[in-house]
């Protein structure tokens, strides 16, 4: 994969670990091709702390894990200080995320699907959508930063599967072993007693690969209504 323009892809998750499990192999594919990758975590996901570890201790642990995972995948990690399971859709977080987007200027943002059993996950794409408008409109003065409008796609998470039907399949066969190595750095992925994260995402990559006719694949989905294509002829069969 060779592209003339260097792209910046930002993967935004509600918690440390979300973005990596959803699109980590895709991120690594683009990082290997020379593009910039940033994982932005709105919270550390610290409330699911293991026995004997305080919430604050686990927060610090997850931030360190996120930095290690990002490095393996070829990107960098940013963790904000919002509290796990307490995200709110308000002007403060919208303005903060919009300011981050103007500062880092991603070409594409990848985030959670719109529907989820986890409230933080469900709020995340709504925050991204609202920040998209605020970052892009020149009428907002955000620390004197130039306006920046970005597109966004959704990625696949086991908690976000209601009405998630993939629009895009990405071949990540060459990247999948590194992706699994990266995932194994997270304590919760390897030790959770409530969900078999590692097994699920290895199997999911296999299943999506079957449909894609490749060894492994990860998927993306357009925002609702965003997969509509307008023109004079069938996309790919232009007259």
Image (cartoon, rainbow, N blue to C red):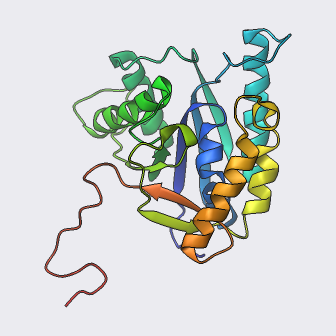
Q: In the current view of this chain or complex, which residue is farthest to the front?
A: 194
Residue at x 27%, y 87% (from the top left corner): 237
Residue 202: horizontal and vertical position, in percent? 72, 55
Residue at x 36%, y 54% (from the top left corner): 222
230, above or below 224, in the image = below
Locate residue 173: give its quadrant: bottom right
Decide if residue 178 is on the left or right side of residue 43: right
Q: Is residue 133 visible?
A: yes
174, above or below 127, in the image = below
Q: Nearer the viewer, residue 23 or 95?
A: 23
208, above or below 236, in the image = above
Quadrant into which the N terminus falls:
bottom right
Q: Is residue 34 visible?
A: no
Residue at x 47%, y 18% (from the top left corner): 87
169, above or below 146, in the image = below
Q: Nearer the viewer, residue 38 or 18?
A: 18
């Amino acid at each position: 994969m060779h592209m003339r323009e260097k792209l910046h892809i930002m993967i935004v998750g509600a918690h440390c670990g979300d973005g990596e499990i959803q699109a980590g192999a895709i991120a690594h594919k683009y990082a290997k091709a020379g593009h910039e990758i940033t994982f932005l975590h709105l919270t550390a996901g610290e409330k699911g702390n293991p026995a004997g570890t305080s919430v604050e201790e686990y927060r610090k642990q997850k931030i360190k894990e996120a930095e290690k995972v990002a490095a393996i995948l070829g990107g960098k990690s940013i963790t904000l200080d919002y509290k796990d399971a307490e995200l709110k859709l308000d002007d403060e977080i919208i303005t903060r995320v919009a300011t981050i987007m103007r500062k880092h200027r991603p070409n594409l943002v990848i985030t959670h699907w719109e529907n989820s059993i986890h409230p933080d996950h469900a709020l995340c794409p709504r925050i991204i959508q609202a920040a998209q408008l605020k970052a892009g409109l020149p009428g907002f003065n955000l620390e004197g930063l130039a306006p920046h409008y970005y597109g966004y796609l959704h990625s696949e998470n086991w908690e976000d599967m209601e009405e998630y039907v993939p629009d895009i399949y990405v071949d990540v066969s060459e990247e999948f072993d590194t992706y699994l190595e990266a995932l194994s750095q997270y304590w919760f992925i390897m030790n959770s007693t409530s969900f078999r994260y590692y097994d699920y995402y290895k199997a999911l990559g296999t299943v999506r690969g079957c449909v894609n006719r490749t060894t492994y694949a990860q998927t993306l989905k357009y925002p609702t209504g965003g997969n509509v294509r307008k023109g004079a002829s069938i996309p790919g069969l232009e007259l």
